[in-house]
Image (cartoon, rainbow, N blue to C red):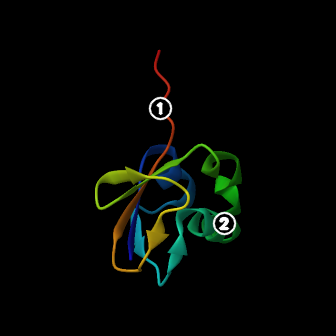
Amino acid sequence: MKVLYFSVVKERIKKGEEELDFKGTVSELRFVLSQRYPELKDLLERIKFAVNEEYVGDDYELKGDERVALIPPVSGG
């Protein structure tokens, strides 16, 4: 699957996208990413996941061929 990173996530891990070999739920992917990128642990609970440009919940089952975008919380001012 292609994983796309934006905003503060992209800044912290120094990449905008990557290919991951993963199948499982969004919740499981959230855990895998927290292990892979400890610098994201504080953000991952609040990040929204979009699969093929549609927001999904933590129980959404990923098959491995999707485009998954991590959308961090946005603060205005």
From the top left corner, tell me how far across and down residue 55 is, in percent: 38, 50
Numbered disc total: 2
Label 1: element kind: loop
Q: Residues within 10 Å of mark 2 (few under 14, many from 20)?
A: some
Q: Nearer the viewer, residue 60 or 32?
A: 60
Quadrant (top left, top right, bottom left, bottom right) of the N terminus: bottom left
User: What residue is shown at x 62% (from left), y 69% (from top)?
Assistant: 28
Disc with the residue nearer the chain's start (2 vs 1): 2
Quarter of the image for residue 59 reads bottom right
Q: Which residue is mark 2?
A: 31
Quarter of the image for residue 19 reads bottom left
Q: Which residue is mark 1?
A: 74
User: What residue is shown at x 54% (from left), y 76% (from top)?
Assistant: 24
From the top left corner, tell me how far across and down residue 35 is, in percent: 70, 69
Q: CA distance from mark 2 to mark 1?
A: 22 Å
User: What residue is shown at x 45% (from left), y 63% (from top)?
Assistant: 15
Query: Looking at the picture, which amino acid does disc 1 mark?
Result: Val
Return the residue found at the far left.
53
Left or right of 41 in this view: 60: left
